[in-house]
Amino acid sequence: MIQYIIRRILYSLPVLLGIVFVTFTLARVLPGDPCRAVLGEKATDQVCDAFIKRNGLDKPIPTQFVIYLGQVLKGDLGDSFRQGRSSVAILAERLPVTIELAIAAMILATIVGIPLGMVSAYWRNSPLDVVTMVGANIGVSTPVFVLGLLLEYLFAIILKDTFLRLPPSGRLTSGLVLPSLAQAWGLTNLTGAGATTIGFLSKLYIFNALVTGHWEILADVLKHLILPAAAVGTIPMAIIARMTRSSMLDVLGLDYVRTARAKGLRVRQVIFRHALRNAMLPVVTVIGLSMGGLLSGAVLTETVFNLAGVGRTLYESISARDYTVVQAFTLVIAVFYVSVNLLVDVLYAFLDPRIRLS
Amino acid sequence: MQTTEAIPIAPRARSFNPYWEAFRRLRRSKSAIVGTTILALLGFAAIFAPVLSSYDPTLPLIGVENVTKRGPPCIHLLGCPSDQPEHYFGIDGNVRDVFSRVLYGARLSLIIGLTTVSFAIVIGTGLGLLAGYSGGQADNIIMRFMDVLQAFPSLLLAIAIVTVLGPGLINALLAIGIVEIPTFARVLRASVLSIKELDYVSASRALGGSSLHIMLRRILPNALTPLIVQGTLGIATAILDAAALSFLGLGAQPPTPEWGLMVGQEYKNIFNAPHLTFFPGIALMLTVLSFNLLGDGLRDSLDPRLAQKGFEGRV
Amino acid sequence: MKSKWQHLATFIILASVVLAACQPAATPAPTEPPVPPTAVVAPTEIPFTPMKFEATSCDYGGILKSIEAVDRLTVKFTMCVPDPAFPAKAAFSAFQIYPTEVLQSTGGGGDLIEHPVGTGPYVLEAWNRGDNVTLRRFDDYWGEKAKSATVVFRWSQEGPQKLIELQAGTVDGIDNVAPDDIAKVQADPKLQLIPRAAFNIFYVGFNNTYAPFDNEKVRQAIAMSIDRKRIVDTFYPPGSKVADQFLPEGLLARPTDSKWYAFDPVAGKALLAQAGFPNGFETTLTYRDVFRGYLPEPPVVAQDIAAQLKANLNVTVKLVQMESGAYLDASDAGEIKGLHMLGWTGDYPDPTNFYDYHFGAGATKQFGTKWDDITSRLTQAGQLGDEEARRVIYTEVNDLLKQHVPMIPMAYGASAAAYKAAVVGAHASPLGNESMEVMYIPGQDTFVWMQNAEPIGLYCADESDGESLRVCEQINESLLAYEVGGVKVIPSLATGYTANADATEWTFTLRDGVKFHDGSFLDANDVVLSWDVQWDAASPLHVGRVGDFSYFSGLFTSFLNAPK
């Protein structure tokens, strides 16, 4: 098992290196003069000469890459030109929203998708099955931003005067303030990594509200999160439902299940004890693969619902020509995605001994 | 986000045409039927757009007709007074007819899907064949590169590429095409690997057949099935990604009547002019749905394993 | 399975990881709130060493000659040439006063952009990037304390979105109601609509250093071929007007009977053919997608202009959308080729605010090379006190602008703010600087205001975007101010001023006992240094956010020691 994990990690190292190389290339290939892109249009030639020397831009490309690699590993992802502060600080600020959105979407997708898939598999070809599968198909085919807009219209306008009303944008109703964790826990004079971490945790509103006991705020945050999570989570939900259904069907037809039923085990026992566990394997893979879709969907959903998350910040930084932030965020997202895939592979191996031993 | 499977078709001894069998299964597949029907309607709309639409999709109607900016749909059959000009889908923010724009958008979306997937298939096939057939270091390098490409979520990678190239429809198509290459490369490589060691290939080689001959005559036809399936699904993804890029302002530029762009320009007015978001959005959904259904139907009918089991209800 | 190559690669990667990680880690700079002072010493007990900054000679090309702290509460400005508009300029937010210690400790930039310290009725509590700016009441304010204890600035670029929030009650006031929504607000008894007079101009500009717009005939041809009335009637809210000149109505010394080119596409096409483009040409139109009073829907208007130019002149226009901050920076640097759409909302009620900022000798490179016949006249008019004499010169300037066409004046855009009906003190300023300290909802101690965009920076000396200026105006103050909701100049940090006979010397008397948010007291040195860091390009504190200080340069013609 350990061997397998180590093998998988070593296998992904070249991929990680490749990612760093791609983001490095990205910044070098972007249009415009790198000095003026960072220091602004007013930078004189003298200032730019100094900038180029200081950042080693006159050295050969391989040297530059090694320097960049070193910076990345030290956690220095550069400073944002537009905002004048480090990309890591901006990341710590924006990441919590996207994380909450992604987790909520994934939970929604799993909680709704798996039971739907199971039920469809069990009552195969019934009207319920047909409706579910057609719905899943439609869910996969609707662009995330269209879905988000339709949901927004439905719940914020059409259902405006009912109890089903949901807010159309933002994370929190304005006027509601969630104090930082540093305040709540009486921590003062934090600097450096500690301050960044506490700041990051404070911006995870759900975690913050849970830990400090602000229940009304927790409810408000959750209400704001429902629509975006539904928009982002629909595609994974549809895929999970279909995948669950098909692998359940595969398993339900297998010999040992028929044997179990012949032995007189009740259907529910059969499903939960035997079929489900084995059917979960491909579903776990799908969950991992869906992370990429979640991150892509996050960009669009954050734009539609006006959330200040990583996706939208990346997109805004591109428009604002803030190349350091673009580079930093792309790198972080890709590394995160690779890590999730790694995790899924390990999980898969854990669940299925056949993989480990191969 | 469709998974790729390698589907080896074992050579049959009988002179039994697998393709005709597949086609008969396809005709019975409900999803393929629905998908093809919608696609046919779409194709009809795309081809005959100039005839079906009564207005120029990029011409503002200010001064030409007495209509209000962002006006609601006016359909005479559904009660709109007959002295008002008929606009099935209403008027957009630049006082243009939305119905005409949606029709021309069909044309654009189909072209987008076909070109990006063709580009990705050509390059992906080349890479996959090379990787699978050569094996060893070439295989390693190419597949590592595909891994790196797939390490980025597809839309974000497309955004990154478009940033480098500059916004515009052509650049967006290139970006989406590049993002789709790994899928096809893997399909081809898997097909190659499954066939490479089979007896009849070794026999071909022993008989002096050149590599190229083997690749074209033996391996490619085997890979055709998954390519067709993956290609159809790839068109769906391409249309979605192009719409997303245009929605963000990185793809098609105004006044092009691309559906994603239309939503991107008017979504802020969803509360007072929902028809401007709704019609292009539904058009997008139906188009992508048709390709997904067709792809599913193709997969079900072209994959003999599933056909043997007969479990999957063909929805 | 693992080949030698893979072993080697893995070793190299691990080695570089170890090497790189072995170096000391860089910690990101902490962001801390301003440190409160430990003890407050009464101002009269501190010995006062007055500051003075002086230009060696008036040949440097600017208006200012010297800024001097005469004593602790008196500041004297000496000009090279008469500047009768100086009080109106001094009231403007770009010339706010900061404590000398803060300017020095931040180096004139950096932290100053995000944590300004001022004398205003509100203190910056937090700037939650991407989400809101929160201000809290300054209890030691020299004037009447703010009515609402907390003010929250939020923003949304989507006009209809703002109205949703207002109707839902999540915000208390919004700026720039979308034209389609004005009727809705008027019909709703829970809301009040406050119209804002059109004190702005929307124009389409050209940079004359890029072909084919270096040809005056081309610019004139385009000016004749855009139907501006169609744009105003279709895309602007009621109350907006087609612009007949660059200056909006209501300004003193404004030329009367001004006539812009009539819409005549036939003549335009003929002129374009004369200029050498009988079949048109290809160009770009650059714009930013932000909602402003002068331009409510940029993408829509841009598409219409493109459609018109194609139809009337066969000029193919490709639309280029840029992000707001990048757009302003690029436009100021003179980098935008082709056409561009921009506008201007008046900051203070004098033609110098409109003319000098854009076409004066100290203007940015937005329109390319400046015209001497225009700049000389503007300099002249800026020094006169008599309104009619100025009107004569401005009429000449207007005619020259029509001839040279650096830009096509399109519209004066009416706009409106909307508030909950319960808001007391609701107003809309024609200058776009609403005073949050007079607005409140009885029984509520937070006031939430939603504008069009996030501030770009909070150091107003180096900002020109109204969304940034409105926020820093609550935190910092200038020597003078404008009355709430109006344009009249009133005392602020200065209780009054005197001028000499020819308006070359202006002496301001500062208010005594004014405290900054950090507890220190206002004195003349703060005023002098705050002005000098903008004026003197050689000062180490002349930093800002990007270093443009475009208002100073536009209104006072030149920096001291400006780089060539």
Image (tube, rainbow, N blue to C red):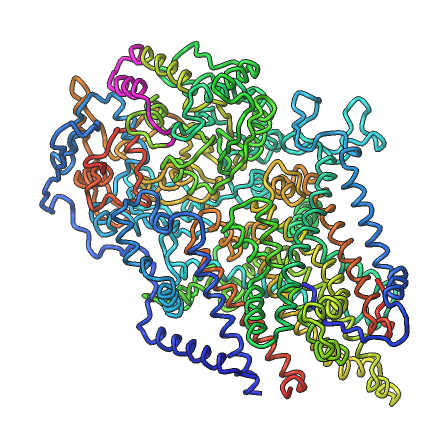
Q: Residue furthest bottom?
A: A263
Residue drawn at x 56%, y 17% as measured from the top left: C265
| Magenta run includes residue C368 | yes
Residue drawn at x 47%, y 24% as measured from the top left: C197
- Name the residue nearer the viewer: C248 or C276: C276
* Residue A262 screen position, x and y as percent: 89, 87
Q: Is residue C54 above or below residue B314?
A: above
Q: Quadrant of residue C490?
A: top left
* Residue C471 screen position, x and y as percent: 39, 41
- Name the residue nearer the viewer: A331 or C564: C564
Which residues are the magenta region? Answer: C366-390
Q: Quadrant of residue B13?
A: bottom right
Horizontally, residue A264 falls left or right of residue A177, namely: right
* Residue C371 screen position, x and y as percent: 32, 22
Taken as a whole, is the magenta stretch helix, strand or loop? Answer: helix
Q: How many marks?
A: 0
- Name the residue nearer the viewer: B1 or C208: C208
Question: Can the viewer see residue C344?
Answer: no
Question: Can the viewer see residue C325?
Answer: yes
Horizontally, residue A70 falls left or right of residue C293, namely: left
Q: Quadrant of the N terminus of chain C?
A: bottom right
